[in-house]
Image: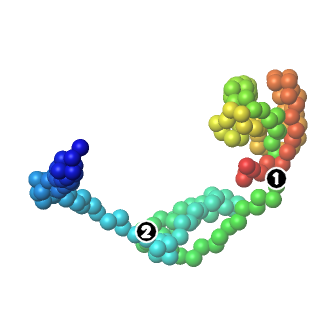
Amino acid sequence: MTAQFKNRLVGTIILVALGVIVIPDVLDGKKNRIEEEFNAIPFAPKVDSLPPLLIDLPSEQGQKDNSSESNNSEKVASNQQLEPEVIRTIDFDKPAYIVQLGTFKNADNVSRLVAKLRDAGFQAHSYPEPAVEGELNRVFVGPNVSQKTLEQQQAKLKELTGLSGTIRQFDPLFK
């Protein structure tokens, strides 16, 4: 190849490259941008500005208090003003109990066992719900506040499933 041919070839490549880069921008002209309009999400109200949620629990004194409390709640609702009320506490000192029948890895077996127990009238559940294949899945019956009732049910559970299980104290936050 001669030097003159090489110079022409390099020049042609440069012109084609510039044409490929610059010409599309020139031919497209000004591009229109579409901006979407949206409504701003309002901020959440401050918790201090909301009225407290009050729930009237039935009192131990009977129907007389219930009728007077319902009248008070109607007054509060109609006036939209909250009067100071006596806050009652509920005593949860008594523990509840459950029967843990077993821990299984097969999710199908857990689902069948829970269904069988529910069909027999037991309050049965598993953790995690729904059962996860390959993970440890616990099967429970209960909860019940009477440990004696669960002890009596253990014989029926053993007859139905072949599992006697163990009675444990119920923890609603159990994970």
Q: Which residue is found at the position 64% from the left and 72% from the top?
A: 86
- Mark 1 Cα within 10 Å, few/some/many (few <14, many 20+)? few
Horizontal arrangement in the rendering, residue 15 relative to residue 53 (left or right): left
Q: Position of residue 61 (x, y in %)?
A: 69, 62
Kind of residue indicated by mark 1 = Pro
State the residue in front, 99 or 78.
99
Locate residue 99, reporting x and y percent.
82, 39
Whether residue 64 can be seen here: no
The residue drawn where x is 71% and y is 33% is 134
Q: Quadrant of residue 133?
A: top right
Q: Can the viewer see residue 15?
A: yes
Q: In the rendered view, would you say 142 is above or below 68?
A: above
Spatial CA distance of label 2 from label 1 is: 39 Å
Q: Residue drawn 82% across and 45% down?
A: 97
Q: Which mark is residue 31?
A: none
Residue that badge 1 annotates:
95
Q: Residue at x 85, y 45 (%)?
A: 168
Q: Quadrant of the N terminus?
A: top left
> Considering only order in the chain, which callout, 1 or 2, is on the residue closer to the N terminus?
2
In the rendered image of this protein, does residue 71 appear above or below residue 94? below
At mark 2, the secondary structure is loop
> What is the three-letter code of the residue carrying label 2?
Ala
Q: Secondary structure at mark 1?
A: loop
Given this view, does label 2 or label 1 mark the residue nearer the observer?
Answer: 2
Q: Is residue 51 left or right of residue 136?
A: left
Disc 2 target residue? 44
Relative to 158, residue 2 above or below? below
Measured from the top left, where is residue 19 in percent x and y?
A: 16, 52
Camera-side residue: 138 or 49? Answer: 138
